[in-house]
């Protein structure tokens, strides 16, 4: 039978009933005999994502739900199926009545009498430089997901412990729409990063303090096979500098160096996935302020308000070893502003730079 269209399943357990039949033997018999039979039932409404990425809902008028195991009774009930079994786990397949193709194979667990606590997910130690090949075919009762994706699909967890501040890189290649996200301290800890670009390759680069982190390979309404590789490198301590490095005053000249680290900001003229340095700029009276940057890497220089709104932005790109000279000028009211020195894009935007600021009354000074 045709199975190529099968991508993912989502079984909703909507109702659980328990029937108990007790029979008592003859009062004149040598002993009483009690026979107890427990029968469980549930309603299933299978949903999956087809080869075109559309969500498909199976209903009895178009599809046939067929149990794989013996001793299972299936009855169509409106827009779903009622399944009865003495077993705690029921495996079934969904068949297209028009073509006879098997479009989904799945299983549902019956919980009788009380809500069972979900078992803890399996966590695999993540070893640097080692390629992990796996699949996300098995779903748990808890659907973990990240801020960027992972809803409606099974996930596999990995754990990595860093003994010192490190640069952690993750490469995920999959045959399905995969999401990868990282949490700090535990599976339910705060999310650090999440990537789901609806592609078959997801890449994560980040600088982390020493500690334990959990990495999830998840599917957004999908599941399948994947390959995960991690890389760990010691990082330059400057990559963990405070977000605001120093206060920039009119007339100041500062030298710095951008090193590879996570990108926190970007502006209309550039800065995507590139590291940056942030300087505070305090203006005490209305002023015309000019800030200039000198670098030999592709760079972006931008000025933002205290609320993060962009005031001015300029980028500069060139040939290797050429001098880049972006600058921004703005009339500013009294207040706090931020000057951001950024790479123009990507990890190539790193290197040494010189930053200068001039203000009212200092426009002609060097």
Image (cartoon, rainbow, N blue to C red):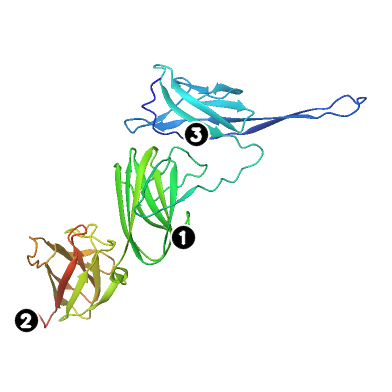
Can you give x and y, in whole percent of width and height, for residue 11 in the image? 49, 34
**310 relative position to 42: left or right:** left
Work out whether mark 3 precedes mark 1 in sequence or the reverse, and give the earlier one.
3
Q: Secondary structure at mark 1?
A: loop
Q: Residues within 10 Å of mark 2 (few under 14, many from 20)?
A: few
Can you give x and y, in whole percent of width and height, for residue 255 in the image? 18, 76
Q: Which quarter of the image is occupied by the C terminus?
A: bottom left
| Residue occupied by mark 3 | 11
- Above/below status of 233 relative to 107: below
Tell me the quarter of the picture where residue 323 sits. Answer: bottom left
| Residue occupied by mark 1 | 185
- Above/below status of 195 relative to 261: above
Q: CA distance from mark 3 to mark 1?
A: 31 Å
Q: Which quarter of the image is occupied by the N terminus?
A: top left
- Above/below status of 10 relative to 212: above
| Residue occupied by mark 2 | 364
Q: Secondary structure at mark 3?
A: loop
**In this rendering, the label closer to the viewer, 1 or 2:** 1
């Amino acid at each position: 039978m045709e199975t190529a269209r099968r991508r993912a399943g989502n079984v909703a357990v909507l109702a659980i009933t328990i029937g108990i039949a007790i029979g008592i033997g003859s009062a004149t018999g040598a002993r009483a005999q009690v026979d107890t039979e427990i029968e469980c039932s549930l309603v299933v409404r299978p949903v999956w994502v087809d080869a075109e990425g559309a969500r498909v809902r199976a209903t009895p008028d178009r599809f046939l739900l067929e149990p794989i195991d013996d001793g299972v009774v299936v009855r169509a009930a409106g827009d779903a199926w009622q399944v009865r079994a003495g077993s705690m786990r029921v495996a079934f397949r969904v068949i297209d009545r028009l073509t006879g193709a098997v479009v989904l194979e799945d299983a549902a667990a019956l919980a009788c009498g009380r809500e069972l606590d979900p078992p803890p997910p399996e966590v695999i130690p993540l070893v640097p430089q080692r390629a992990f090949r796996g699949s996300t075919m098995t779903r748990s009762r808890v659907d973990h997901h990240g801020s960027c994706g992972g809803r409606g699909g099974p996930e596999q967890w990995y754990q990595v412990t860093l003994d010192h501040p490190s640069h952690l890189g993750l490469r995920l290649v999959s045959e399905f729409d995969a999401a990868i996200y990282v949490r700090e301290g535990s599976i339910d800890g705060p999310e650090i990063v999440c990537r789901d670009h609806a592609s078959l390759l997801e890449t994560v680069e980040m600088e982390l303090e020493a500690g334990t982190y959990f990495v999830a390979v998840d599917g957004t309404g999908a599941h399948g096979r994947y390959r995960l590789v991690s890389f760990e490198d010691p990082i330059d301590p400057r990559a963990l500098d405070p977000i605001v490095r120093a206060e920039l005053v009119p007339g100041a000249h500062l030298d710095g160096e951008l090193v590879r680290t996570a990108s926190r900001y970007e502006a209309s003229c550039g800065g995507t996935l590139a590291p940056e340095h942030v300087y505070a700029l305090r203006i005490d009276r209305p002023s015309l302020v000019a800030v200039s940057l000198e670098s030999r890497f592709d760079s972006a220089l931008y000025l933002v308000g205290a609320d993060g709104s962009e005031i001015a932005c300029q980028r500069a790109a060139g040939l290797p070893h050429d001098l880049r000279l972006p600058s921004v000028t703005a009339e500013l009211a009294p207040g706090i502003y931020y000057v951001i020195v950024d790479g123009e894009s990507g990890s190539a935007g790193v290197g040494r730079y010189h930053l200068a600021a001039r203000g009212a009354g200092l426009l002609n000074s060097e």
